[in-house]
Amino acid sequence: MTTQLPPGMHIETVDEKIMTLNVGPQHPGSGHMRLIIKVDGDYIVSCDPDPGYVHRGEEKMAEYRNYIQNIPHLERPVIHDSSNILYPYCLGVEELLGIEVPERAKYIRVIAAELNRCIYILYWLAIYGIFLGHSTMFMWPAGDRELFIDLLEAMSGARVTHAYLIPGGVRNDLPSNFEERCLRQVEYFEKRLKEYEAIFYQNPLLKARTEGSGILSRTDAIRLGTTGSVLRASGVDFDVRKKEPYDVYENLDFQTIVMKEGDSYARSRIPYLEMFESCRIIKDALKKMPKSGSVRTKLKPNPKGGNDEVYRRVESGRGAIGYYIVSNNRPEPYRVKISVGSFRNLICMPYLLKGEKLGNMPAVYWGLNYWPVEADR
Amino acid sequence: MNSGTEKDEVKDTAEAHSTNSENTSRSDSMSKDEAKKFYEEKGLDLSPDVPVKPKPIPVFEKSLADKISSKFGNKIHVDYVRADRIRVTTKREDIVDVAKFIRDELKYDHAESVSGVDYPDSSEIEVVYHLGSYTDEKLGRQIFALATRVPREDVPNPGSDGTRTPSLRDVFYSVEFHERECFEMFGVYFEGHPDMRRLLLPEDWADIPPFRKDFKIKGR
Protein backbone atom coordinates (compact mmCIF):
# COMPACT_ATOMS: atom_id res chain seq x y z
CA MET A 1 0.00 0.00 0.00
CA THR A 2 1.37 3.38 -0.92
CA THR A 3 0.47 6.42 1.10
CA GLN A 4 -0.06 9.73 -0.60
CA LEU A 5 2.11 12.23 1.26
CA PRO A 6 1.45 15.95 1.15
CA PRO A 7 4.01 17.94 -0.84
CA GLY A 8 7.06 18.82 1.15
CA MET A 9 7.00 15.63 3.22
CA HIS A 10 8.92 12.45 2.61
CA ILE A 11 9.68 9.12 4.24
CA GLU A 12 13.33 8.49 4.95
CA THR A 13 14.89 5.10 4.42
CA VAL A 14 17.36 3.98 7.04
CA ASP A 15 20.76 2.53 6.24
CA GLU A 16 22.19 0.49 9.08
CA LYS A 17 25.75 1.63 8.48
CA ILE A 18 24.86 5.30 8.53
CA MET A 19 24.14 7.10 11.78
CA THR A 20 22.12 10.31 11.95
CA LEU A 21 23.19 13.00 14.39
CA ASN A 22 21.29 16.09 15.38
CA VAL A 23 23.83 18.83 16.02
CA GLY A 24 21.84 21.53 17.71
CA PRO A 25 19.62 23.47 18.11
CA GLN A 26 20.92 23.76 21.67
CA HIS A 27 24.41 22.58 20.97
CA PRO A 28 26.86 25.48 21.35
CA GLY A 29 28.82 24.25 18.35
CA SER A 30 26.01 24.94 15.97
CA GLY A 31 24.57 28.16 17.29
CA HIS A 32 20.79 28.45 17.33
CA MET A 33 20.25 26.04 14.49
CA ARG A 34 20.21 22.35 13.81
CA LEU A 35 22.44 20.44 11.47
CA ILE A 36 21.13 16.99 10.60
CA ILE A 37 24.37 15.18 9.93
CA LYS A 38 24.72 11.63 8.68
CA VAL A 39 27.99 9.96 9.50
CA ASP A 40 29.63 6.81 8.24
CA GLY A 41 32.16 6.06 10.96
CA ASP A 42 33.97 9.34 11.46
CA TYR A 43 33.14 10.89 8.10
CA ILE A 44 30.19 13.08 7.25
CA VAL A 45 28.09 11.61 4.44
CA SER A 46 25.50 14.36 4.21
CA CYS A 47 24.43 17.47 6.03
CA ASP A 48 21.00 19.05 6.03
CA PRO A 49 20.89 22.47 7.66
CA ASP A 50 17.68 23.19 9.54
CA PRO A 51 17.52 26.86 10.54
CA GLY A 52 14.47 28.68 11.86
CA TYR A 53 14.74 28.23 15.60
CA VAL A 54 15.18 31.96 16.12
CA HIS A 55 12.88 33.18 13.38
CA ARG A 56 11.30 36.40 14.61
CA GLY A 57 9.43 37.56 11.56
CA GLU A 58 11.30 40.86 11.19
CA GLU A 59 9.96 41.23 7.65
CA LYS A 60 6.39 40.79 8.81
CA MET A 61 6.81 43.16 11.75
CA ALA A 62 8.19 45.83 9.42
CA GLU A 63 4.86 45.90 7.55
CA TYR A 64 3.07 47.09 10.69
CA ARG A 65 5.37 49.95 11.70
CA ASN A 66 6.24 53.16 9.96
CA TYR A 67 9.63 53.91 8.47
CA ILE A 68 11.09 55.36 11.67
CA GLN A 69 9.53 52.85 14.08
CA ASN A 70 11.15 50.05 12.11
CA ILE A 71 14.68 51.05 13.07
CA PRO A 72 15.12 49.48 16.52
CA HIS A 73 13.70 46.08 15.63
CA LEU A 74 15.43 45.72 12.28
CA GLU A 75 18.83 45.74 13.95
CA ARG A 76 17.89 42.81 16.21
CA PRO A 77 18.85 39.95 13.84
CA VAL A 78 22.50 40.78 14.37
CA ILE A 79 23.04 43.13 17.24
CA HIS A 80 26.84 42.87 17.02
CA ASP A 81 26.70 44.41 13.59
CA SER A 82 23.71 46.64 14.13
CA SER A 83 24.97 49.61 12.11
CA ASN A 84 25.60 47.49 9.04
CA ILE A 85 22.21 45.80 9.06
CA LEU A 86 20.48 49.18 9.39
CA TYR A 87 22.63 50.80 6.72
CA PRO A 88 20.84 49.46 3.61
CA TYR A 89 17.47 50.13 5.21
CA CYS A 90 18.44 53.78 5.73
CA LEU A 91 19.80 54.04 2.17
CA GLY A 92 16.62 52.48 0.81
CA VAL A 93 14.26 54.71 2.78
CA GLU A 94 16.29 57.77 1.78
CA GLU A 95 15.97 56.81 -1.87
CA LEU A 96 12.27 56.14 -1.42
CA LEU A 97 11.58 59.45 0.33
CA GLY A 98 14.08 61.49 -1.68
CA ILE A 99 16.12 62.64 1.33
CA GLU A 100 19.60 64.09 1.01
CA VAL A 101 22.04 63.19 3.78
CA PRO A 102 24.46 65.86 5.11
CA GLU A 103 28.11 65.28 4.23
CA ARG A 104 29.26 64.98 7.84
CA ALA A 105 26.59 62.39 8.58
CA LYS A 106 27.86 60.25 5.71
CA TYR A 107 31.32 60.11 7.25
CA ILE A 108 29.95 59.42 10.73
CA ARG A 109 27.89 56.57 9.32
CA VAL A 110 30.92 55.04 7.66
CA ILE A 111 32.87 55.27 10.92
CA ALA A 112 30.00 53.68 12.84
CA ALA A 113 29.69 50.91 10.25
CA GLU A 114 33.42 50.12 10.34
CA LEU A 115 33.56 50.16 14.16
CA ASN A 116 30.62 47.78 14.13
CA ARG A 117 32.29 45.54 11.58
CA CYS A 118 35.27 45.22 13.94
CA ILE A 119 32.97 44.45 16.86
CA TYR A 120 31.30 41.70 14.87
CA ILE A 121 34.51 40.19 13.55
CA LEU A 122 36.10 40.17 17.02
CA TYR A 123 33.05 38.46 18.47
CA TRP A 124 33.07 35.92 15.69
CA LEU A 125 36.82 35.39 16.09
CA ALA A 126 36.37 34.73 19.81
CA ILE A 127 33.81 32.00 19.10
CA TYR A 128 35.87 30.58 16.28
CA GLY A 129 38.88 30.41 18.59
CA ILE A 130 37.12 28.68 21.45
CA PHE A 131 35.55 26.08 19.18
CA LEU A 132 38.94 25.17 17.87
CA GLY A 133 40.10 24.76 21.45
CA HIS A 134 42.17 27.95 21.53
CA SER A 135 41.01 29.73 24.67
CA THR A 136 43.48 32.63 24.35
CA MET A 137 41.78 33.49 21.09
CA PHE A 138 38.53 33.68 23.00
CA MET A 139 39.86 36.06 25.67
CA TRP A 140 41.82 38.46 23.49
CA PRO A 141 39.18 39.42 20.92
CA ALA A 142 36.48 39.49 23.59
CA GLY A 143 38.59 41.96 25.53
CA ASP A 144 39.69 44.10 22.57
CA ARG A 145 36.09 44.30 21.41
CA GLU A 146 35.44 46.57 24.39
CA LEU A 147 37.55 49.29 22.75
CA PHE A 148 35.07 49.60 19.93
CA ILE A 149 32.04 49.10 22.13
CA ASP A 150 33.22 52.05 24.23
CA LEU A 151 33.62 54.19 21.12
CA LEU A 152 30.15 53.34 19.83
CA GLU A 153 28.74 53.88 23.30
CA ALA A 154 30.21 57.37 23.25
CA MET A 155 28.67 57.95 19.82
CA SER A 156 25.22 56.53 20.40
CA GLY A 157 24.67 56.04 24.12
CA ALA A 158 24.10 52.30 23.93
CA ARG A 159 26.65 49.53 24.21
CA VAL A 160 25.31 46.99 21.76
CA THR A 161 21.95 47.89 20.24
CA HIS A 162 22.79 51.34 18.99
CA ALA A 163 20.00 52.17 16.50
CA TYR A 164 22.39 54.97 15.59
CA LEU A 165 21.82 55.15 11.84
CA ILE A 166 18.50 56.59 10.82
CA PRO A 167 17.05 57.66 7.47
CA GLY A 168 18.41 61.15 6.95
CA GLY A 169 21.71 60.73 8.75
CA VAL A 170 22.63 59.68 12.27
CA ARG A 171 20.73 60.14 15.50
CA ASN A 172 23.12 62.57 17.18
CA ASP A 173 26.43 64.27 16.62
CA LEU A 174 29.75 62.96 17.86
CA PRO A 175 30.77 63.86 21.41
CA SER A 176 33.56 66.38 21.96
CA ASN A 177 37.14 65.11 21.45
CA PHE A 178 35.78 61.92 19.87
CA GLU A 179 38.25 62.19 17.00
CA GLU A 180 41.36 62.03 19.18
CA ARG A 181 39.94 59.25 21.31
CA CYS A 182 38.91 57.19 18.32
CA LEU A 183 42.28 57.67 16.63
CA ARG A 184 44.17 56.68 19.79
CA GLN A 185 42.14 53.52 20.32
CA VAL A 186 42.26 52.47 16.70
CA GLU A 187 46.04 52.91 16.59
CA TYR A 188 46.39 50.85 19.76
CA PHE A 189 44.15 48.18 18.28
CA GLU A 190 46.23 47.96 15.11
CA LYS A 191 49.31 47.18 17.20
CA ARG A 192 47.33 44.64 19.18
CA LEU A 193 45.95 43.01 16.06
CA LYS A 194 49.44 42.12 14.87
CA GLU A 195 49.85 39.91 17.94
CA TYR A 196 46.90 37.79 16.81
CA GLU A 197 48.88 36.69 13.81
CA ALA A 198 51.61 34.94 15.80
CA ILE A 199 49.43 33.36 18.45
CA PHE A 200 46.56 32.22 16.28
CA TYR A 201 47.08 32.34 12.55
CA GLN A 202 50.60 30.93 12.59
CA ASN A 203 49.63 28.30 15.14
CA PRO A 204 50.50 24.87 13.66
CA LEU A 205 47.46 23.26 15.29
CA LEU A 206 45.09 25.71 13.69
CA LYS A 207 46.79 25.29 10.34
CA ALA A 208 46.60 21.50 10.59
CA ARG A 209 42.87 21.62 11.22
CA THR A 210 41.84 24.25 8.75
CA GLU A 211 44.25 24.23 5.82
CA GLY A 212 42.84 22.21 2.97
CA SER A 213 39.56 21.48 4.72
CA GLY A 214 36.21 22.44 3.26
CA ILE A 215 37.52 23.68 -0.06
CA LEU A 216 35.09 25.77 -2.10
CA SER A 217 36.22 26.37 -5.67
CA ARG A 218 35.80 29.70 -7.42
CA THR A 219 33.18 28.31 -9.80
CA ASP A 220 31.15 26.85 -6.96
CA ALA A 221 31.38 30.02 -4.90
CA ILE A 222 29.85 31.96 -7.79
CA ARG A 223 27.32 29.29 -8.70
CA LEU A 224 26.07 28.96 -5.13
CA GLY A 225 25.77 32.75 -4.85
CA THR A 226 27.90 32.99 -1.72
CA THR A 227 28.91 36.36 -0.42
CA GLY A 228 31.32 38.16 1.87
CA SER A 229 34.43 36.47 3.19
CA VAL A 230 33.38 33.07 1.81
CA LEU A 231 33.31 34.49 -1.70
CA ARG A 232 36.54 36.45 -1.35
CA ALA A 233 38.35 33.44 0.11
CA SER A 234 37.56 31.60 -3.12
CA GLY A 235 39.28 34.18 -5.27
CA VAL A 236 36.37 36.38 -6.34
CA ASP A 237 37.12 40.07 -5.96
CA PHE A 238 33.73 41.37 -4.91
CA ASP A 239 33.01 43.83 -2.16
CA VAL A 240 29.93 46.04 -2.31
CA ARG A 241 31.97 48.89 -0.77
CA LYS A 242 34.16 48.84 -3.89
CA LYS A 243 31.74 47.67 -6.57
CA GLU A 244 28.75 49.81 -5.64
CA PRO A 245 30.18 52.41 -3.23
CA TYR A 246 27.56 53.94 -0.98
CA ASP A 247 27.85 57.20 0.95
CA VAL A 248 31.53 58.18 0.98
CA TYR A 249 33.30 54.86 0.49
CA GLU A 250 34.59 55.91 -2.93
CA ASN A 251 36.59 58.76 -1.33
CA LEU A 252 38.23 56.51 1.21
CA ASP A 253 41.45 54.60 0.96
CA PHE A 254 41.19 50.83 1.41
CA GLN A 255 41.48 47.63 -0.55
CA THR A 256 39.59 44.38 -0.88
CA ILE A 257 41.20 41.30 0.61
CA VAL A 258 41.06 38.33 -1.74
CA MET A 259 42.59 34.89 -1.26
CA LYS A 260 42.75 32.04 -3.75
CA GLU A 261 42.79 28.94 -1.54
CA GLY A 262 39.07 28.67 -0.77
CA ASP A 263 39.69 26.54 2.31
CA SER A 264 38.66 27.03 5.90
CA TYR A 265 41.93 28.76 6.76
CA ALA A 266 41.49 31.39 4.05
CA ARG A 267 37.89 31.97 5.12
CA SER A 268 38.94 32.57 8.71
CA ARG A 269 41.86 34.80 7.75
CA ILE A 270 39.99 37.20 5.50
CA PRO A 271 37.86 38.80 8.26
CA TYR A 272 41.02 39.24 10.32
CA LEU A 273 42.81 41.05 7.49
CA GLU A 274 39.69 43.11 6.85
CA MET A 275 39.96 44.57 10.33
CA PHE A 276 43.22 46.27 9.26
CA GLU A 277 41.34 47.76 6.31
CA SER A 278 38.52 48.86 8.62
CA CYS A 279 41.08 50.67 10.78
CA ARG A 280 42.46 52.34 7.66
CA ILE A 281 38.96 53.45 6.66
CA ILE A 282 38.23 54.85 10.13
CA LYS A 283 41.49 56.82 10.22
CA ASP A 284 40.97 58.13 6.70
CA ALA A 285 37.35 59.08 7.40
CA LEU A 286 38.34 60.93 10.58
CA LYS A 287 40.84 62.91 8.52
CA LYS A 288 38.49 63.74 5.64
CA MET A 289 35.33 64.34 7.69
CA PRO A 290 33.94 67.90 7.74
CA LYS A 291 34.68 69.20 11.23
CA SER A 292 31.25 70.71 11.76
CA GLY A 293 27.83 70.80 10.20
CA SER A 294 24.49 69.11 10.37
CA VAL A 295 24.35 65.35 10.95
CA ARG A 296 20.69 64.76 10.29
CA THR A 297 18.09 65.80 7.77
CA LYS A 298 14.84 66.11 9.63
CA LEU A 299 12.09 63.94 8.20
CA LYS A 300 8.50 64.98 8.03
CA PRO A 301 6.33 63.34 10.65
CA ASN A 302 5.10 59.97 9.42
CA PRO A 303 6.41 60.28 5.86
CA LYS A 304 4.74 58.32 3.07
CA GLY A 305 6.81 56.39 0.59
CA GLY A 306 5.05 56.86 -2.75
CA ASN A 307 4.20 54.02 -5.13
CA ASP A 308 7.68 52.71 -5.58
CA GLU A 309 10.24 50.08 -4.70
CA VAL A 310 13.97 50.06 -4.00
CA TYR A 311 16.71 47.48 -3.61
CA ARG A 312 19.78 48.71 -1.73
CA ARG A 313 22.73 46.73 -0.42
CA VAL A 314 25.83 47.21 1.66
CA GLU A 315 28.75 45.02 2.71
CA SER A 316 28.43 43.76 6.27
CA GLY A 317 30.74 41.60 8.34
CA ARG A 318 29.13 38.51 6.85
CA GLY A 319 28.63 39.59 3.27
CA ALA A 320 26.20 41.71 1.34
CA ILE A 321 22.94 42.70 3.01
CA GLY A 322 20.21 43.74 0.61
CA TYR A 323 16.90 45.37 1.46
CA TYR A 324 14.02 45.18 -0.95
CA ILE A 325 11.42 47.72 0.17
CA VAL A 326 8.06 47.99 -1.58
CA SER A 327 5.95 51.00 -0.70
CA ASN A 328 2.35 51.80 -1.59
CA ASN A 329 1.69 55.40 -0.57
CA ARG A 330 1.42 54.51 3.08
CA PRO A 331 3.54 55.50 6.09
CA GLU A 332 4.38 51.81 6.56
CA PRO A 333 6.29 49.80 3.97
CA TYR A 334 4.15 47.31 2.04
CA ARG A 335 6.83 44.65 2.07
CA VAL A 336 10.38 44.51 3.38
CA LYS A 337 12.63 41.67 2.31
CA ILE A 338 16.02 41.36 3.93
CA SER A 339 18.54 39.31 2.00
CA VAL A 340 21.35 38.61 4.43
CA GLY A 341 24.81 37.15 3.99
CA SER A 342 24.31 34.35 6.49
CA PHE A 343 21.25 33.03 4.70
CA ARG A 344 23.01 33.17 1.36
CA ASN A 345 26.07 31.34 2.68
CA LEU A 346 23.93 28.65 4.30
CA ILE A 347 23.59 26.89 0.95
CA CYS A 348 27.25 25.88 0.82
CA MET A 349 27.19 24.14 4.20
CA PRO A 350 26.07 20.74 2.80
CA TYR A 351 28.77 20.96 0.11
CA LEU A 352 31.61 21.82 2.44
CA LEU A 353 30.80 19.36 5.19
CA LYS A 354 30.41 16.36 2.88
CA GLY A 355 33.46 14.13 3.30
CA GLU A 356 34.83 16.04 6.28
CA LYS A 357 35.62 14.40 9.59
CA LEU A 358 32.98 15.01 12.20
CA GLY A 359 35.55 16.52 14.57
CA ASN A 360 36.35 19.12 11.95
CA MET A 361 32.78 20.28 11.69
CA PRO A 362 33.19 23.39 13.93
CA ALA A 363 36.24 24.51 11.95
CA VAL A 364 34.26 24.48 8.71
CA TYR A 365 30.98 25.67 10.21
CA TRP A 366 32.34 28.70 12.05
CA GLY A 367 34.72 29.48 9.22
CA LEU A 368 31.66 30.27 7.12
CA ASN A 369 31.20 33.39 9.20
CA TYR A 370 27.63 32.34 9.71
CA TRP A 371 25.26 33.89 12.20
CA PRO A 372 22.09 31.77 12.71
CA VAL A 373 20.01 34.59 14.18
CA GLU A 374 20.67 36.73 11.14
CA ALA A 375 19.91 33.91 8.73
CA ASP A 376 16.49 33.38 10.32
CA ARG A 377 15.61 37.08 10.61
CA MET B 1 6.15 54.73 -10.84
CA ASN B 2 5.45 57.90 -8.86
CA SER B 3 1.81 58.75 -8.88
CA GLY B 4 0.04 61.76 -7.46
CA THR B 5 0.91 65.35 -8.12
CA GLU B 6 1.94 67.90 -5.54
CA LYS B 7 -1.60 69.22 -5.35
CA ASP B 8 -3.08 65.80 -4.65
CA GLU B 9 -0.65 65.17 -1.86
CA VAL B 10 -1.47 68.45 -0.09
CA LYS B 11 -5.17 67.71 -0.34
CA ASP B 12 -4.65 64.20 0.86
CA THR B 13 -2.68 65.19 3.93
CA ALA B 14 -5.08 67.94 4.85
CA GLU B 15 -8.02 65.59 4.49
CA ALA B 16 -6.40 63.00 6.66
CA HIS B 17 -6.23 65.51 9.46
CA SER B 18 -9.73 66.81 9.01
CA THR B 19 -11.67 63.59 9.51
CA ASN B 20 -14.45 63.47 12.10
CA SER B 21 -15.32 67.11 11.47
CA GLU B 22 -18.58 66.69 13.44
CA ASN B 23 -16.74 65.73 16.58
CA THR B 24 -15.52 69.16 17.60
CA SER B 25 -13.99 68.06 20.89
CA ARG B 26 -11.14 66.24 19.15
CA SER B 27 -8.05 68.32 18.53
CA ASP B 28 -7.52 66.85 15.06
CA SER B 29 -10.92 67.91 13.79
CA MET B 30 -9.97 70.85 11.64
CA SER B 31 -11.08 72.06 8.26
CA LYS B 32 -8.58 71.90 5.42
CA ASP B 33 -7.69 75.59 5.75
CA GLU B 34 -7.35 75.33 9.51
CA ALA B 35 -5.17 72.28 9.20
CA LYS B 36 -2.96 74.01 6.67
CA LYS B 37 -2.64 77.05 8.90
CA PHE B 38 -1.96 74.84 11.92
CA TYR B 39 0.87 73.07 10.16
CA GLU B 40 2.30 76.31 8.79
CA GLU B 41 2.37 77.82 12.28
CA LYS B 42 4.16 74.76 13.58
CA GLY B 43 6.73 75.16 10.85
CA LEU B 44 5.87 71.83 9.19
CA ASP B 45 5.65 71.87 5.45
CA LEU B 46 2.91 70.19 3.52
CA SER B 47 4.90 69.50 0.41
CA PRO B 48 4.69 65.93 -0.89
CA ASP B 49 6.73 63.35 1.00
CA VAL B 50 8.48 62.26 -2.14
CA PRO B 51 9.73 65.07 -4.38
CA VAL B 52 8.96 64.30 -8.00
CA LYS B 53 12.26 64.64 -9.82
CA PRO B 54 12.60 63.35 -13.37
CA LYS B 55 15.80 61.32 -13.61
CA PRO B 56 17.68 60.71 -16.85
CA ILE B 57 17.56 57.15 -18.15
CA PRO B 58 21.07 55.68 -17.90
CA VAL B 59 22.62 54.48 -21.15
CA PHE B 60 24.20 51.18 -20.12
CA GLU B 61 21.12 49.94 -18.28
CA LYS B 62 18.97 50.98 -21.24
CA SER B 63 21.13 48.92 -23.60
CA LEU B 64 20.64 45.82 -21.41
CA ALA B 65 16.90 46.40 -21.28
CA ASP B 66 16.79 46.88 -25.05
CA LYS B 67 18.63 43.61 -25.58
CA ILE B 68 16.09 41.65 -23.58
CA SER B 69 13.05 43.40 -25.08
CA SER B 70 14.28 42.88 -28.64
CA LYS B 71 14.61 39.16 -27.91
CA PHE B 72 11.30 38.59 -26.15
CA GLY B 73 9.13 41.42 -27.49
CA ASN B 74 5.78 41.58 -25.78
CA LYS B 75 6.40 38.48 -23.68
CA ILE B 76 8.09 40.72 -21.15
CA HIS B 77 7.35 44.12 -19.72
CA VAL B 78 10.18 46.44 -18.67
CA ASP B 79 8.86 48.09 -15.49
CA TYR B 80 11.70 50.53 -15.01
CA VAL B 81 15.26 51.29 -16.00
CA ARG B 82 17.15 53.32 -13.43
CA ALA B 83 20.74 53.82 -12.40
CA ASP B 84 22.06 50.29 -11.59
CA ARG B 85 18.59 48.78 -11.44
CA ILE B 86 16.41 47.13 -14.09
CA ARG B 87 13.11 45.45 -13.45
CA VAL B 88 11.33 43.17 -15.87
CA THR B 89 8.03 41.37 -15.43
CA THR B 90 7.16 38.26 -17.36
CA LYS B 91 4.52 35.57 -17.40
CA ARG B 92 5.34 32.46 -15.41
CA GLU B 93 5.29 30.30 -18.54
CA ASP B 94 8.18 32.29 -20.01
CA ILE B 95 10.24 32.84 -16.88
CA VAL B 96 12.67 29.97 -17.44
CA ASP B 97 13.48 31.12 -20.99
CA VAL B 98 13.91 34.72 -19.86
CA ALA B 99 16.13 33.63 -16.96
CA LYS B 100 18.29 31.52 -19.29
CA PHE B 101 18.71 34.51 -21.59
CA ILE B 102 19.67 36.72 -18.63
CA ARG B 103 22.25 34.17 -17.53
CA ASP B 104 23.74 33.32 -20.93
CA GLU B 105 23.53 36.60 -22.83
CA LEU B 106 23.45 39.30 -20.17
CA LYS B 107 25.96 37.44 -17.92
CA TYR B 108 24.18 37.65 -14.61
CA ASP B 109 25.38 34.66 -12.62
CA HIS B 110 23.69 34.43 -9.23
CA ALA B 111 20.53 35.35 -7.34
CA GLU B 112 20.81 37.63 -4.34
CA SER B 113 17.29 37.14 -3.09
CA VAL B 114 13.89 35.77 -3.99
CA SER B 115 11.05 37.78 -2.51
CA GLY B 116 7.37 37.12 -2.48
CA VAL B 117 4.98 40.05 -2.37
CA ASP B 118 1.34 39.37 -1.61
CA TYR B 119 -1.38 41.33 -3.42
CA PRO B 120 -4.71 40.04 -2.08
CA ASP B 121 -6.70 42.79 -3.85
CA SER B 122 -5.74 41.49 -7.28
CA SER B 123 -5.58 37.85 -6.07
CA GLU B 124 -1.94 37.52 -7.03
CA ILE B 125 1.42 36.87 -5.44
CA GLU B 126 4.46 38.40 -7.04
CA VAL B 127 7.77 36.55 -6.98
CA VAL B 128 10.79 38.80 -7.53
CA TYR B 129 14.27 37.43 -8.25
CA HIS B 130 17.10 39.88 -7.65
CA LEU B 131 19.99 38.83 -9.83
CA GLY B 132 23.56 40.04 -9.72
CA SER B 133 26.90 39.25 -11.30
CA TYR B 134 30.30 38.41 -9.86
CA THR B 135 32.11 37.56 -13.05
CA ASP B 136 31.34 40.56 -15.25
CA GLU B 137 33.18 43.73 -14.15
CA LYS B 138 30.61 46.03 -15.75
CA LEU B 139 27.71 44.41 -13.94
CA GLY B 140 29.20 44.77 -10.45
CA ARG B 141 26.86 47.63 -9.62
CA GLN B 142 23.84 46.18 -11.33
CA ILE B 143 20.86 44.36 -9.90
CA PHE B 144 18.37 42.82 -12.31
CA ALA B 145 14.92 42.26 -10.85
CA LEU B 146 12.97 39.56 -12.66
CA ALA B 147 9.37 39.37 -11.51
CA THR B 148 6.44 37.12 -12.24
CA ARG B 149 2.93 36.87 -10.87
CA VAL B 150 1.16 33.74 -9.76
CA PRO B 151 -2.55 33.32 -8.93
CA ARG B 152 -3.44 33.36 -5.27
CA GLU B 153 -6.14 31.29 -3.62
CA ASP B 154 -8.16 32.67 -0.74
CA VAL B 155 -7.94 29.36 1.11
CA PRO B 156 -4.36 28.28 0.47
CA ASN B 157 -3.27 24.70 0.29
CA PRO B 158 0.46 25.06 -0.31
CA GLY B 159 1.79 22.66 -2.86
CA SER B 160 -1.60 21.36 -4.01
CA ASP B 161 -3.31 24.51 -5.27
CA GLY B 162 -2.75 26.68 -8.34
CA THR B 163 -0.20 28.94 -6.64
CA ARG B 164 2.78 27.56 -8.52
CA THR B 165 5.50 28.68 -10.87
CA PRO B 166 8.47 26.97 -12.55
CA SER B 167 11.56 26.88 -10.38
CA LEU B 168 14.69 28.71 -11.53
CA ARG B 169 16.96 26.36 -9.60
CA ASP B 170 18.34 24.78 -12.75
CA VAL B 171 19.19 28.19 -14.17
CA PHE B 172 20.46 29.90 -11.03
CA TYR B 173 21.58 27.30 -8.53
CA SER B 174 21.74 29.88 -5.75
CA VAL B 175 17.94 30.26 -5.54
CA GLU B 176 17.60 26.87 -3.85
CA PHE B 177 17.08 28.00 -0.25
CA HIS B 178 15.45 31.29 -1.22
CA GLU B 179 12.71 29.43 -3.11
CA ARG B 180 12.19 27.12 -0.17
CA GLU B 181 11.69 30.14 2.05
CA CYS B 182 9.24 31.67 -0.43
CA PHE B 183 7.31 28.39 -0.53
CA GLU B 184 6.74 28.20 3.20
CA MET B 185 6.15 31.92 3.76
CA PHE B 186 3.82 32.55 0.79
CA GLY B 187 2.69 29.11 -0.32
CA VAL B 188 4.16 29.47 -3.81
CA TYR B 189 5.13 26.02 -5.07
CA PHE B 190 8.17 25.98 -7.35
CA GLU B 191 7.76 23.22 -9.93
CA GLY B 192 10.93 21.32 -10.69
CA HIS B 193 12.69 22.26 -7.48
CA PRO B 194 14.36 19.07 -6.23
CA ASP B 195 13.87 19.69 -2.51
CA MET B 196 10.69 21.69 -1.94
CA ARG B 197 10.55 21.27 1.84
CA ARG B 198 10.01 23.78 4.58
CA LEU B 199 13.12 25.53 5.78
CA LEU B 200 12.48 28.00 8.56
CA LEU B 201 8.98 27.13 9.76
CA PRO B 202 8.44 24.17 12.09
CA GLU B 203 7.27 20.90 10.52
CA ASP B 204 3.94 21.05 12.35
CA TRP B 205 2.98 24.56 11.24
CA ALA B 206 -0.74 24.26 10.51
CA ASP B 207 -1.74 27.87 9.82
CA ILE B 208 -1.76 29.71 6.49
CA PRO B 209 1.61 30.85 5.08
CA PRO B 210 2.59 33.56 7.56
CA PHE B 211 3.85 36.30 5.23
CA ARG B 212 0.53 36.56 3.41
CA LYS B 213 -1.38 39.72 4.15
CA ASP B 214 -4.34 37.91 5.71
CA PHE B 215 -2.10 36.42 8.40
CA LYS B 216 -2.28 39.07 11.11
CA ILE B 217 0.12 39.57 13.98
CA LYS B 218 -1.73 39.31 17.26
CA GLY B 219 -2.56 42.67 18.82
CA ARG B 220 -1.97 44.62 15.62
Image (cartoon, rainbow, N blue to C red):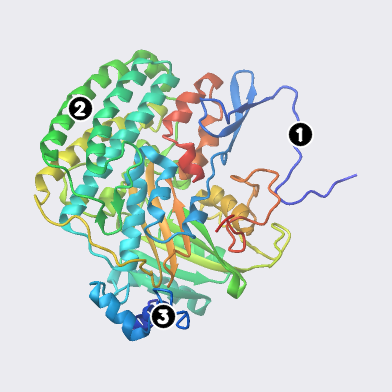
Quadrant of the drawing holding the N terminus of chain A: top right
Task: Give the farthest residue toward the right.
Answer: A1
- Point out which mark residue A13 bears: 1
- Point out which mark residue B18 bears: 3
Q: Is residue A73 above or below residue A22?
A: below
Q: Residue at x 30, y 58 (%)?
A: A167
Which mark lies nearer to you, 3 or 2? Answer: 3
Q: Residue at x 46, y 70 (%)?
A: B88
Q: Is residue B31 above or below residue B211?
A: below
Whole-angstrom CA distance, mark 3 to mark 2, is 58 Å
Please, what secondary structure does the residue beneath circle 2 have? helix
Q: Chain of mark 3?
A: B
Residue corresponding to mark 2: A189
Describe residue A50's horizontal placement relative to residue A107 as left or right: right
Which mark lies nearer to you, 1 or 2? Answer: 2
Q: Chain of mark 1?
A: A
Whole-angstrom CA distance, mark 1 to mark 3, is 67 Å
Which mark lies nearer to you, 1 or 3? Answer: 3
Density class for disc 1 (Cα within 10 Å; few <14, some 14-19, many ≥20) is: few
Q: Is residue A248 above or below residue A80?
A: below
Percent coordinates x, y for residue B100 in the rendering: 51, 61
Please, what secondary structure does the residue beneath circle 1 have? loop
Whole-angstrom CA distance, mark 1 to mark 2, is 54 Å
Q: Which amino acid, mark 2? A: Phe
Q: Is residue A327 above or below residue A284?
A: below
